[in-house]
Each structure stands twice: as structure tokens, then as C-alpha cells.
Amino acid sequence: MAYDEFLAERFRAALGKTKGVSEKRMMGGVCFLLNGNMVGGADRAKDGQRRFMFRVGKDNAEKASALQGGEPMMQGRRRMTGLYFVAEEACSDDVMQSWLDLAVSFAKTLPPK
């Protein structure tokens, strides 16, 4: 994974002026946190695919499956519950906002770190 400034800026802009947001370079990309809890991130995969990652929580799996463009995050053959990748080309502004709304609402349920 590699850092992609264009994607990071797009994620940043979509978050707007949400209070409590911070950034942290992680896993080769950049992650965005709300009160210390991960909301999602942006990176470029080894194969060059530009993508966003959203942490929506396992209880939101049904809602996430109804959203456009999402693919569950896999680590080897293991599905990472509550984490989804969305390819940049499939992520229009409206799609991005839907994923972000779900991820932010999940992060708000967690205690601040």
C-alpha cells in the first residue's frame, strides 16, 4: 500500500469540518480518526488500485452491503469484519458520502480514546 495525496485530500474534504477528526499514517496509507477511533482511510494498493477504506462495524454489515461499490476487506483468506474497500473510480461524491456517514455514525458509538 502507498500513500496517495489525492485520495487523502478527497477523504479530508468529505469529512469537512467534523469535530474531533485527526489523521494518522498507517498501513502505508493515511487513516482518519474520530475521537481516536478509525473512520477509514485512503491508499493505493500494490497493484496500483486507488481505494478508500471504511470502518463501519460488524453490526452495520447489512447496511454496508446495500451501499454501492463496497468490497469486504480481506487479510489472506480471512474477512476483516466491519471493514470495506471502495475503489476510487466507483466512489462518486454521493457514494463516498454514504459510506462516510455510516463509518462516522459507527465511530460515534465508540468511547473516545
Image (cartoon, rainbow, N blue to C red):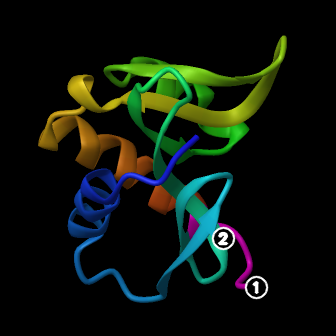
Instruction: Provide the residue designation for mark 2.
Output: 37
x 56%, y 32%: residue: 84
106 up-or-down from 13: above or below: above
The disc, 2 or 1, on the residue closer to the chain's N-terminal end is 2
x 23%, y 57%: residue: 10
**Circle number at residue 60:** none
Q: Which span of residues is magenta-colored?
A: 107-113
x 76%, y 85%: residue: 113
Q: Is residue 4 left or right of residue 77?
A: left
Q: What secondary structure is marked by label 2?
A: strand
The quadrant holding residue 77 is top right
Residue nearest the viewer, comparing 47 with 102: 47
Residue nearest the viewer, comparing 62 with 95: 95
The quadrant holding residue 48 is top left
53 up-or-down from 12: above or below: above
Mark 2: which amino acid?
A: Asn
Q: What secondary structure is marked by label 1?
A: loop
Residue 75 position, x and y percent, is: 79, 25
**Tally of numbered tags:** 2
Mark 1: which amino acid?
A: Lys
Instruction: Provide the residue designation for mark 1.
Output: 113
Residue 102 position, x and y percent, is: 44, 48
Which secondary structure is most common in the magenta stretch? loop
